[in-house]
Image (tube, grey):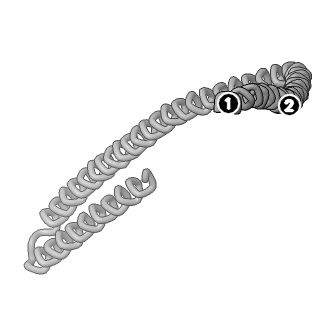
Amino acid sequence: MSDYCIDEAFIRHERILTARRLKELEELEKLEKLEGESRTPLVVAGVVLLLAIAAMLYLNLGYHYSDLFVERSIHQAHDKHLDLLEETRENLKGLTEYVDGQSRLVRETNQLIAELQSQRDKIKPILETEVQAVNALFHAQEERSRKERLGETILSFILGVVSSIAATFLWEAVSKRRRRWRNKQAPNLGNAS
């Protein structure tokens, strides 16, 4: 961006110098015309000398002015460049702080993961042992429960058979009594008739 400003200033300076040269040529042409009109050589020499001095002063001021303009343009370009560099520095500082914060967060997360893995490794054998113990307890409970059900089933069957036999004996006993009672009643019935 600063090269552009310097190039622009240089082009302006060249244009100013070209315009000044054209003016000098026009003034010289005017002087030649005046000489041709038969003026005195002393007046012409004085005018030429005055014109030359004026042109030199004008060129000297033009150079000085263009140098100031170029210098001012260069300073402005440098100031803009320095401002841009300072802004870039601030942006980089902010970015560095963000990256540092993210790095710290990643380190803390990795440390937490390592601690959790360590705790998992410590707890894993205990849990495996407890799982085996719990499985053994469940298996023993299931075996006990199966044996109890089998015992209950056998007991129920035996009680069912025993109660059926008891009911049969009871039925037979009641039936025998009834027959006896009928038999006792039957001879009495025959006597009563």
Q: Is residue 175 left or right of residue 18?
A: right
Report the residue marked by disc 1.
189
Is 100 left or right of 142, judged from the image as shown?
left
Residue at the extreme bottom: 36
Give x and y (percent) for residue 29: 18, 76
Question: 99 and 157: which one is in front?
Answer: 157
Q: Nearer the viewer, residue 49 or 74?
A: 74
Say which element carries label 2: helix
The amino acid beneath tag 1 is Leu
Name the residue located 76 percent from the left edge and 23 percent from the top edge: 116
Quadrant of residue 34 within the rendered picture = bottom left
Report the residue at 66% width, 25% height from top: 104
Mark toward the start of the polypeptide (2 vs 1): 2
Amino acid type for the residue under numbered disc 2: Ile
How far apart in space, not on screen, are marks 2 and 1 (Cα)? Answer: 35 Å
**Residue behind mark 2:** 165
- Residue at point 35%, 56% (across, down): 9
Residue drawn at (40%, 38%) of the image: 79
Q: Quadrant of residue 113?
A: top right
Quarter containing the C terminus: top right
Q: Position of residue 8 (x, y in %)?
A: 35, 59
Q: Position of residue 183 (x, y in %)?
A: 77, 30
Where disc 1 sits, the SS reads helix
The reply to whether discs 2 and 1 touch (Cβ–Cβ < 8 Å) is no
Q: Rate crowding at label 2 as few (under 14), some (14 to 19) or many (20 or more) other CA atoms within 10 Å.
A: few
Could you tell me if residue 121 is visible in this image? no
- Residues packed near mark 1 inside 10 Å, few (<14), some (14 to 19) or many (20 plus): few
Position of 159 relative to 76 (above/below) = above
Nearer to the camera, 174 or 140: 174
